[in-house]
Image (cartoon, grey):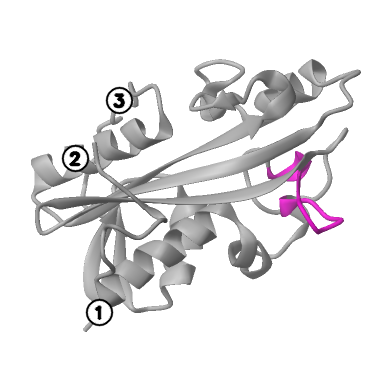
């Protein structure tokens, strides 16, 4: 039987992406699956802090092995905004369309459209904390393209490709995405118990 892990998220898109990446090696449960209806506060000022806050909440409240993630879009010309505020960049209502509109408006007339997506995953396993990071570089398109994916996917073109994340299949996106890379590190750690000194495993704070 596969081991069970809780993913501290209600976001069905992210749960689907990571469940597919786990390929049945682990039984993935969401916050909905464990009956957690609480909106976990994301009061950290970094992706690292927010991921740990969410994982710690689930572990302390339910006593379950779990992991949580936080993802940010960092745009060079906007001083790496929206960053930790990516989900609510245009307001607390968290509208992806409004968030994209704000980014496109702020980038009007700017030549530098380089950006990167960064995901941090915090894992609490048997009471110990581990943190993993995945990054993908790219650029911000001048207009939307594609209908797949979620969030800023329709305006983000990963480096080395001529399509946006929203024009890729879930499988294609996972192979190169920030979240996919962080999940790969998570899975490798779970499978082989990599040393916490690995360059891609950040010290927990």
On the image, the x and y values in percent for residue 38 come to 25, 32
Who's the residue at 63% across and 62% down the image? 176
- Front residue of 192/154: it is 192
Q: Is residue 71 visible?
A: yes
- Front residue of 119/171: it is 119
Q: Which mark is residue 56?
A: 2
Marks 3/1: CA–CA distance: 30 Å
Image quarter (top left, top right, bottom left or bottom right) of the N terminus: bottom left
Query: Considering the numbered disc 2 on the image, is that residue within a helix, a strand or a loop?
Result: helix
Image quarter (top left, top right, bottom left or bottom right) of the C terminus: top left
Marks 3/2: CA–CA distance: 11 Å
Q: Which mark is residue 73?
A: none
Would you name the residue on which mark 1 appears? 2
Q: Which mark is residue 41?
A: 3
Who's the residue at 28% across and 31% down the image? 40
Q: Which residues are the magenta region?
A: 153-165
The part of the image, by quadrant, that contains residue 86 is top right
Dot 1 alpha-carbon crowd within 10 angstroms: few under 14, some 14 to 19, many 20 or more: few
Who's the residue at 14% across and 46% down the image? 59
Who's the residue at 28% across and 76% down the image? 192
Q: Earlier in the sequence, mark 3 or mark 2?
A: 3
154 drawn magenta: yes
State whether residue 138 is above or below residue 194.
above
- Front residue of 85/8: it is 85
């Amino acid at each position: 039987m596969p081991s069970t892990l809780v993913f501290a998220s209600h976001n069905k898109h992210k749960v689907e992406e990571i469940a597919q990446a786990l390929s049945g090696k682990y039984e993935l449960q969401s916050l909905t699956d464990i009956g957690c209806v609480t909106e976990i506060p994301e009061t950290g000022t970094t992706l690292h802090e927010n991921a740990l806050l969410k994982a710690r909440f689930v572990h302390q409240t339910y006593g379950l092995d779990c992991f949580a993630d936080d993802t940010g879009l960092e745009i060079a010309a906007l001083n790496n905004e929206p960053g930790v505020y990516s989900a609510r960049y245009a307001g607390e209502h968290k509208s992806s369309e409004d968030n994209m509109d704000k980014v496109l408006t702020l980038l009007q007339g700017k030549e530098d459209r380089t950006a990167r997506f960064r995901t941090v995953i915090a894992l609490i396993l048997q009471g110990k904390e581990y943190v993993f990071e995945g990054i993908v570089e790219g650029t911000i398109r001048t207009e939307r393209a594609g209908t797949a994916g979620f969030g800023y996917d329709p305006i983000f073109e990963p480096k080395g490709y001529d399509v946006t994340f929203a024009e890729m299949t879930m499988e294609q996106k996972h192979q190169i995405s920030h979240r996919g890379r962080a999940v790969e590190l998570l899975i490798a750690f779970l499978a082989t118990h990599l040393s916490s000194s690995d360059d891609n495993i950040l010290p927990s704070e």
